[in-house]
Image (cartoon, grey):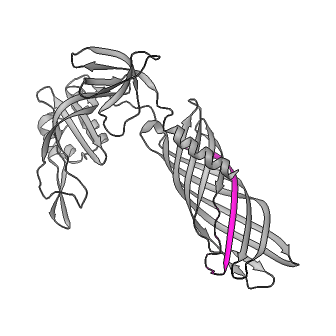
Amino acid sequence: MKYFVYIFTFTCINYTAFSQIKYEKGYYINNSADKMEGYIKNIDWLNNPTNFLFKSSENSISQNLDIASVKEFGVYNRLKYVREKVQIDRSSESHFLMSSEKNPIFKDEVLFLKVMLEGNATLYSYTDGNLHRFFFKTTDSQIDQLVYKTYKIRKTLISKNNYYKQQLLTNLPCEKITTTLVEKVDYNKNDLVEIFTDYNNCGASKNVSIDSKENRDLFNISIRPGARLSTLQFVNSTAGILVKDFDKEIRFSLGVESEFIFPFNKNKISALIEPTYQYFTSETISNNQKASVDYKSLELAAGVRYYIFLSEQSKIFANFQFIFDFTGNSKILLADRPDLEIESKNNLIFGIGYKWRDRLSLELRTYTKREILSRYQAWRSGYDSNALILGYTLF
């Protein structure tokens, strides 16, 4: 079963890279100002794109269109990008690369800017890795970057240029937008969308939100009871003799999974943290000598999950996780030798599963062999497990 889970997990990971990213109804405007209707491959870009795939019909061959030939493109009711020549400051916020210059260092670039909100004042965003910039335009001004910059005063002292707050006060005149209000505005999407919305409502402008993502459940807590089939072998490496080989035993486990779904790439990737209580007890007789094991631990598994969507209500997934194992008062009791205290090393999990209506899940997982006698040089062990886990998502 282990090899099946390994192969299926990696197959899911590879397949997921191409799944659930579909062509959606959209358009683009070319350099001649012609609007072309069709279908755009919406990959839910994390970084602002420089090109995209377009089909004139669902069954036609896709075209790769780039920023040189397209002035604007969008997916209806989802997103919109416009080509603009702007001055952008790409100063790094990394401590090692941070500038000592307070003022932004602008360079002219042609970019696809994402439209966040349209009205008398329009808000745009641009993301490129760790670089996040916001731009704006009003009926009385051309497009400009909202200036926010961290810079070094000394090696250990960092300051901030918050000129964007003055820009908001100057360019968004409205009784509701006061100095006190602007001082509370951070340089992030939510705060800026809110204040631009306030301005457009103040001016009786038609306020259109373009960055209209589908409802997303980005954080889940699940209870996960499971049945685990485990076995244990250990050997005295000095003598080279297999001391004990415990039979496979079914024992129950209980975990609580926290899942954070990354808000890009169509909700296909998530990060997991799952503490699980597990135990293994067994007895065996070898060469007329009895041995028993009482192994209890709290496993802390951290890793990633990849989803493949089958429909709106069901999906399959693959997990890859790293386990930190914290043992309690656990021992192996030998009739002819001193007891062995269990202290384990870390190991890996590979899992495949099915989830229905974002509520119920069933997962088959396999664990790489775990060394549980790590404190002894003369002993080697292998704790081997497979598990079937039922999940119920609370929220």
Q: Position of residue 303 (x, y in %)?
A: 52, 54
Percent x, y for residue 194?
28, 37
- Residue depicted at x 22% and y 16%: 33
Number of numbered discs visible in the structure rendering: 0
Query: Which residue is located at x 64 percent, y 67 percent?
Result: 297
In terms of depth relative to the viewer, which is nearer, 229 or 382?
Answer: 382
For residue 241, which quarter of the picture? bottom right
Q: Is residue 314 above or below residue 59?
A: below
- Is 196 placed left or right of 353 in the picture? left
Camera sees residue 176: no
Indicate yes or no whether the magenta region holds residue 377: yes
Q: Is 257 included in the stretch rendered in magenta?
A: no
Q: Quadrant of residue 227?
A: bottom right
Q: Is residue 94 left or right of residue 44?
A: left
Magenta-tinted stretch? 368-395
Q: Position of residue 344 (x, y in %)?
A: 61, 71
Q: In the displayed structure, would residue 110 be above or below residue 302?
A: above
Left or right relative to 28: residue 337: right
Identify the residue shown where x is 79% and y is 68%.
246
Residue appearing at x 70%, y 70% in the figure: 295
Instruction: State the image coordinates of residue 377 (x, y, percent, origin top left).
Output: 62, 81
Vertical comparison of 123 with 129: above or below:
above
Quadrant into which the C terminus falls: top right
